[in-house]
Amino acid sequence: NMHLKSYGERAKQQTNPAAIQLLQTMERKKTNLCVSVDTPKSEDFLAIIDAVGPYSCLIKTHVDILEDFDYSVIERLEELSKKHDFLIFEDRKFADIGNTVTLQYAGGVHKIAKWSHITNAHPVPGPSVVQGLASVGLPLRRGLLLLAEMSTKGTLANGAYTEAAVQMARQNRDFVIGFIAQRRMDGVGAPPGVDSDDEDFLIITPGVGLEQKGDKMGQQYRTPQQVIVESGCDVIIVGRGIYGDNPKAVDLITSRAERYMKEGWSAYLDRISG
Ligand code: S5P
């Protein structure tokens, strides 16, 4: 069972360069924490990333939130990625026809494919969304996550939709490295002949918080223990649980990141020890 193996062992079995790099980073830094930084001012955005970078394997961005965006923010972000040894995940949630997502991924103001090791897409358009993104991302050694489930109350991403998302990933294993989901997906909706022990989808999981059960807009939180041990997910995504409501409180943000890193890693050690 893949979820009982170490991140380092799993890195050896992956083929996509972004998946390998992520798993190796997790093993090397001993962290499965991805910090989600959703803040409108680029100065705060970069200061938070500089503060949480040492504790993170991955930094998740929504660059379209930045009200003062210009491309120099990306250059600073790339410097921080090298300084602190983390990968970048632009949470773009592509969801259009192949031709359109190709243009959105490669170009526009943000040029996501140039700097984001990992991005994600909704499977709703069908396989063409993956084909379009792969045509841009594969030559750049990028990886894609499909949104197989969501953390929100009332999500439509469940049942047959989730199974079809996993099937879509199976058919594009060179580029699709795993899922945004709430549980392990190996073997989900698999046709006969697929050995679920051979599948090793990375599960990157939002909706993680230690203090709150949710927010006022349908978000639902679980603890690192529930996510990593009970549900077999690989990476915890934590946003407001770390940067809270004051993006300037850098010391507090740093100590929260350290706490989530410790909780996530000890949950992982519990899991792989069976
Ligand atoms: O199902 C999902 C998928 C995603 S990518 N639920 C989510 O919350 N997200 C993202 O994770 C969301 O866009 C946000 O950036 C982050 C959660 O932030 P938090 O502040 O609630 O931890």
Image (cartoon, rainbow, N blue to C red):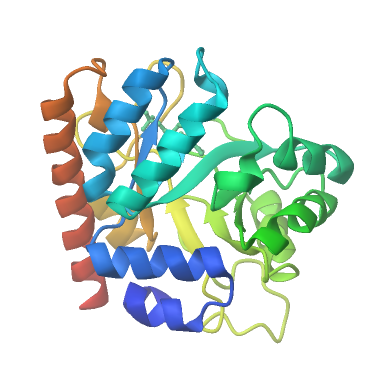
- The answer to which of 42 and 178 lies nearer the viewer is 42
Residue 25 position by quadrant? bottom left
Residue 255's place in the image compared with 11, above or below, is: above
Residue at 25 percent across and 22 percent down: it is 244
Numbered-mark total: 0
Residue at 27 percent across and 36 percent down: it is 50
| Image spot of residue 139 (x, y percent) | 71, 63
Judge from the rendering whether residue 97 lies leftward or rightward of residue 194; answer left or right. right
Residue at 71 percent across and 65 percent down: it is 167
| Image spot of residue 180 (x, y percent) | 53, 49
- The answer to which of 134 and 202 lies nearer the viewer is 134
Look at the image and tell me whether residue 26 can be seen: yes
| Image spot of residue 191 (x, y percent) | 73, 76
Residue 249 position by quadrant? top left
| Image spot of residue 208 (x, y percent) | 32, 40
Judge from the rendering whether residue 224 lies leftward or rightward of residue 39; answer left or right. left
Task: Give the quarter of the figure containing the N terminus.
Answer: bottom left
Q: Quadrant of ligand 1?
A: top left
Residue at 53 percent across and 77 percent down: it is 14
Residue 58's place in the image compared with 97, above or below, is: below
Look at the image and tell me whether residue 209 can be seen: no
Task: Give the quarter of the figure containing the C terminus.
Answer: bottom left
Judge from the rendering whether residue 201 lies leftward or rightward of residue 104; answer left or right. left
